[in-house]
Image (cartoon, coloured by chain):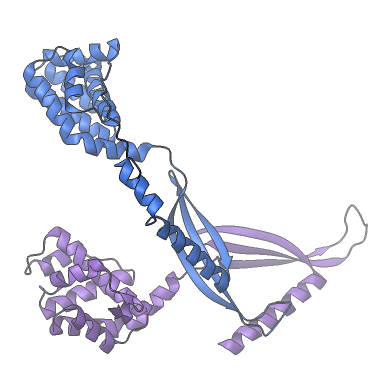
Chain colours: A blue, B purple
């Protein structure tokens, strides 16, 4: 009988001095402002940063735009690092304890972290290293009736055009095959799909959970 | 259950789910919606504001509108792809649960536009590359660095090759001597007569 092994991580996020300094700015503002900063940092994680927002916020609060920028970026980094390492509740609270936040602020940060952890992980997963992957397939069935060398023939051919996406660029590959080869191709691919349902694969997938 | 309009395969689950949404329309609104979707497939684009107004009686949400358009687009283009006649499509849609009047109006629009749909689909078919233009020029070579008196005609051909994936035209330029050109012309004429025999 196979034994599944489950490993438990306890991860404490260690913040650098510079990071702590940036986040210390948050202790000097109201809770509502911090909530607004959290909202802004989530937007930036989703869509990319917009420097003008720093300017408007800095003017409203009467502080330097650089401080606002560091505060928001500090929040972004905190959230993405914790999501990346899948830090659990307790460890998150322990990690931010060093920052000297008020109880309300700590509760607020924890709530925002838990709510958005999954979404941030999805965004991070899209950013990881990627192989070129299949995007689209067009096909055509032709019958070759004659050529310059030989006339009066009947030769079925299948033309395939694959669209392959590699990061941002899409390339197309044109391939040609005959029906016998195509049948062999489809049966090999079907075998590959069926492999997922085999005992071995099922066992591994059970244990990864 | 195998359906002809799905190419003798099972109907996709999402189409089955959309049938109940489509059933909420009256047969008149269904006909107008189908006409809009056909215009979209034929390439003239779809007016979403008009479609939203059409479906507002049946209390369609924004998601419902998009789903209905997608389902109709699939049904119409898939049926045209497999050359299904109007009556069979009518029967199959009723089997899926679409009310009789709605199926009838859908199939009427389908039968009226079948030829145009198939023409558009055949234009969309995969092409390796297309010949966009042919330009030619006949030159007479008088002499060259290798031989003082050459005195030969030569044809310069410029073929425009259109790439279907990105619609760019790349020129292919080459020159052909008199003899080779006669051979090229003979082969092209042979190929042409073969194509005409088929057509």
| Image quadrant assignment for residue A102 | top left
Q: Is residue A85 left or right of residue A177?
A: left
Judging depth in this view, the residue of B54 and A9 nearest the camera is: A9
Q: Is residue A186 left or right of residue B98?
A: right
Any part of residue B166 in sight? no
User: What is the x, y in percent for residue B51?
Assistant: 17, 67
Residue depicted at x 20% and y 62%: B66
Identity of the residue furthest to the front in this view: A1
Q: Is residue A57 above or below residue B150?
A: above
Q: How many marks?
A: 0
Residue depicted at x 42% and y 56%: A195
Residue depicted at x 37% and y 77%: B81
User: What is the x, y in percent for residue A139?
Assistant: 48, 68
- In which quadrant is the C terminus of chain B drawn? bottom right
Q: Is residue B133 left or right of residue A194?
A: right
Q: Is residue A100 above or below residue B98?
A: above
User: What is the x, y in percent for residue A167?
Assistant: 43, 43
Identity of the residue furthest to the right in this view: B148
Any part of residue B197 in sight? yes
| Image quadrant assignment for residue B38 | bottom left
Q: Is residue A131 above or below residue A160?
A: above
Q: Is residue A66 left or right of residue A203?
A: left
- In which quadrant is the N terminus of chain B drawn? bottom left
| Image quadrant assignment for residue B65 | bottom left
User: What is the x, y in percent for residue B77?
Assistant: 32, 74
Judging depth in this view, the residue of A3 and B158 nearest the camera is: A3
Q: Is residue A198 above or below residue B188?
A: above
């Amino acid at each position: 009988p196979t034994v599944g092994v489950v490993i438990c991580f306890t991860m404490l996020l260690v913040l650098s001095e510079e990071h702590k300094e940036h986040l210390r700015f948050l202790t000097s503002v109201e809770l509502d402002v911090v909530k607004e900063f959290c909202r802004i940092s989530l937007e930036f994680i989703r869509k990319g940063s917009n420097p003008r927002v720093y300017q408007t916020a800095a003017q409203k609060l009467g502080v330097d735009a650089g401080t606002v920028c560091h505060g928001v970026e500090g929040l972004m980094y905190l959230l993405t690092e914790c999501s990346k390492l899948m830090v659990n509740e307790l460890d998150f609270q322990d990690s931010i304890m060093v920052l000297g936040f008020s109880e309300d602020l700590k509760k607020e940060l924890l709530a925002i972290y838990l709510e958005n952890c999954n979404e941030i992980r999805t965004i991070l997963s899209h950013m990881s290293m990627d192989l070129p992957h299949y995007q689209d397939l067009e096909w055509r069935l032709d019958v070759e009736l004659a050529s310059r060398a030989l006339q009066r023939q009947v030769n079925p051919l299948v033309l395939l055009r694959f669209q392959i996406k590699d990061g941002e660029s899409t390339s197309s590959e044109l391939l040609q095959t005959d029906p016998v080869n195509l049948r062999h191709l489809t049966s090999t691919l079907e075998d590959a799909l069926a492999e997922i349902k085999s005992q071995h694969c099922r066992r591994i997938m059970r244990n990864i959970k | 259950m195998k359906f002809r309009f799905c190419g003798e395969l099972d109907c996709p689950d999402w189409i089955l789910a959309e049938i109940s949404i489509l059933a909420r329309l009256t047969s008149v609104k269904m006909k107008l919606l189908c006409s809009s979707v056909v215009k979209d497939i034929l390439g003239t684009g779809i007016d979403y504001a008009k479609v939203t107004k059409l479906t507002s009686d049946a209390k369609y949400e924004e998601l419902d509108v998009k789903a209905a358009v997608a389902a109709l687009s699939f049904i119409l283009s898939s049926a045209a792809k497999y050359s299904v006649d109007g009556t069979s499509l009518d029967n199959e849609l009723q089997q899926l649960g679409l009310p009789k009047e709605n199926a009838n109006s859908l199939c009427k629009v389908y039968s009226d536009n079948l030829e145009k749909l198939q023409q558009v689909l055949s234009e969309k078919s995969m092409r390796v590359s297309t010949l966009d233009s042919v330009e030619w020029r006949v030159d007479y070579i008088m002499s060259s660095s290798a031989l003082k008196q050459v005195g030969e005609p030569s044809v310069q051909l410029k073929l425009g090759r259109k790439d279907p994936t990105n619609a760019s035209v790349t020129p292919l330029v080459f020159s052909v001597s008199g003899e080779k050109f006669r051979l090229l012309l003979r082969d092209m004429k042979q190929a042409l007569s073969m194509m005409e025999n088929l057509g």
